[in-house]
Amino acid sequence: MGINVEKLKRLNDLVSLAVRKKSIIVLNPAEHENEKKIGSDIIYDKADWKITEEFSTYVKDLLEDDTLSIEDKILSIYEKICKDYVYDDNLISYIKKVDDDVFSLPDWYGRDIDEEWESNRENHKRRVCYELSRYSAKALTELLKDNDDYNVCIHWNKDLTHYFVGLSCSEYSVILDPDDFFNIKDLTRLKAGLNTQGIKILEDPENKFKNALDKFNKGKSEYAINKIKDEIESDKDIQNSTENEKINENEDIIFLNNVIKILSEKYELDSQGIYEYVKEIVDIKLGSESREKVWKRLEGDDKESTRYIRCLLIKTDEQESLIDVDERKIRPFDREEFKMKKTKYIPYNELSRGGYDYYNGR
């Protein structure tokens, strides 16, 4: 698959319209190292695009599968990334607000990386948009390498410090974004049996990609709260457990405990996935004014491997409770815990991390 600059620029124009921000096209330096700079809006990435041997084998098997359309194969790669990886929400502790809609982030956190970072990342499944986009773009490039009709690139929304993948051909153009920051991410949604929300069709006059996407989403729920309610109501063990709860237990706390139980035991969601799923439910069921974000510190072997994840404080019947997504439980919370000498919990706006507070990727 060669570079078609005009097609890439046209794709970028469509992407910029869709996200309401000018995007920068990012290409794989390993494949274009001998080419000259092609324009101010087209750059080479800070790292080579790579996928694991297992993922490469998966793509080769897709190539040989004559029962699937190209669109099915594209969606299969997207689904694999969503199910194989989880979002590294420690990254959020480094994001700084520059302006109303402009943010900054140290380049070393996933964008401009070294061998130590790559080696440390192999020990877990947590990833950020820079890494996920490279995996997706590389896998799609391998899948479509013999088809010059397709163009694949990464788009960089610099203001939001965000990477995502764009793909176009003569029949359609789409955005593939498994960790859309403003919703429950597809990294979580697809693990929990929900439909995809991170794929945006920019143009598709014959509905070719739309038809494949509709088939992919068939039978999957759009609304997280409705799906989890149905699952709780159909789970006899949960019903029996709920009936045995103390009569004075708050019904919202009982419901959220059951939500966490299903997300942990049935879907085996990571702490970040549980956080964003539960947060959306709280916002819908109780209102966003009833909850407060709080950091939890997870000590590493050394300072450079210490991470911070988000938990939730919620208020029901004048009682504050902590939804600890790391321990997967809800318990009463006293704000005096914030003041304890060795507390793990920090008010959301009081955590200060700068570019020199280095995290090594572990």
Image (spheres, grey):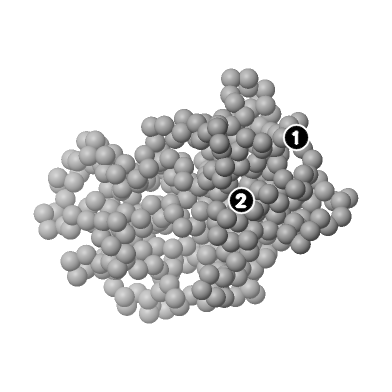
Residue 138 as seen in the image, left or right of residue 198: right
Residue picked out by circle 1: 148
Q: Quadrant of residue 237?
A: top left
Image spot of residue 213 (x, y percent): 50, 35
Residue 182 as seen in the image, left or right of residue 167: left
Residue 19 as seen in the image, left or right of residue 184: right
Residue picked out by circle 2: 14
Residue type pointed to by label 2 = Leu
In the displayed structure, 229 sits above or below 15; it is above
Badge 2 marks a residue whose secondary structure is helix
Image quadrant for the N terminus? top right
Q: Quadrant of residue 71?
A: top right
In the displayed structure, 150 sits above or below 314; it is above
> Which residue is located at x 69 percent, y 33 percent?
143
> Which residue is located at x 46 percent, y 58 percent?
182
Instruction: Spot the residue most to the top.
Output: 66
Give me the C-alpha separation between circle 2 and circle 1: 20 Å
> Which residue is located at x 41 percent, y 32 percent?
218
In the displayed structure, 258 sits above or below 326; it is above
